Image (tube, rainbow, N blue to C red):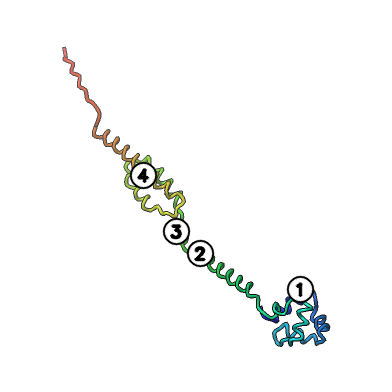
Amino acid sequence: MVLADRLRVHRENKGLSQAAVAEQLNVSRQSVSKWETGKGYPDIDNLVLLSKIYEVSIDELVQENKVLKKKIEENNQTIDDHRKKLDWIHNQGIGDKDEGLLLLIAVIGLSVAAPLGLFLAPIIMKRNKKTNTFYMLINIVSVCCILINLYFTFIMVGDYLLWDQRIEVNYTPDS
């Protein structure tokens, strides 16, 4: 904040008008206006009187607030960091839709479709991304789906090839 702004802020904080300050300093209201707009500067005697009127030190009127300036710079840096993080998160989300629920339903459905689940469950596992909601659950259910499909496929092939069936032929002579 420059001197002109600090003079205006301190005057307004005290609830004084430019005319009231000018009267106390024995200068014109236009002079106070020039100081507050940055078109002119008060001399040292008027600065001393201004510091007494505003009840602040001359240093506070003349010097910039370095602590406040440093805090503003830190806040701006923090805002920039957060903005960059938000942009990164936003850019990561574009094109990467969460397919977690859809993949989970598909894997559960394939668990009962015996030979089809053997081929499609690995494809679903490959399509599953770490950003999906149910990433681990989809992988676990996919492995279970493959095991269930292997079991059912074994049973179907066994039934087709007549494994584990005993054929008994009873011969009864004709009399």
Other-residue count near label 3 (Cα within 10 Å), few / some / many at <14 / 14–19 / ≥20: few
User: Secondary structure under badge 2?
Assistant: helix
Residue drawn at the location 35% of the way across and 47% of the way down:
121
The circle drawn on residue 143 is: 4
Towards the viewer: 54 or 152: 54
Looking at marks 3 and 1 on the same chain, the residue that comes earlier in the sequence is marked by 1
- In the image, is 21 to the left or to the right of 103? right
Looking at marks 1 and 4 on the same chain, the residue that comes earlier in the sequence is marked by 1
Quadrant placement of the C terminus? top left
* Dot in front, 2 or 1: 1
List x then y, in percent, for residue 164: 25, 29
- In the image, is 113 to the left or to the right of 12? left
Q: Name the residue tied to disc 3.
A: 96
Measure the alpha-carbon separation of dots 1 and 4: 72 Å
Looking at marks 4 and 2 on the same chain, the residue that comes earlier in the sequence is marked by 2
Towards the viewer: 172 or 143: 143
Q: Tags 3 and 1 in contact by the CB under 8 Å rule?
A: no
Looking at marks 2 and 1 on the same chain, the residue that comes earlier in the sequence is marked by 1
Mark 2 is on which residue type? Lys
Q: Name the residue tied to disc 1.
A: 13
Measure the alpha-carbon separation of dots 4 and 3: 24 Å
* Dot in front, 3 or 2: 2
* Dot in front, 4 or 3: 4
Quadrant placement of the N terminus? bottom right
* Dot in front, 3 or 1: 1
Mark 3 is on which residue type? Asp
Looking at marks 4 and 3 on the same chain, the residue that comes earlier in the sequence is marked by 3
User: Secondary structure under badge 1?
Assistant: helix
Q: Residue 142 falls in which quadrant of the image?
A: top left
Towards the viewer: 18 or 128: 18
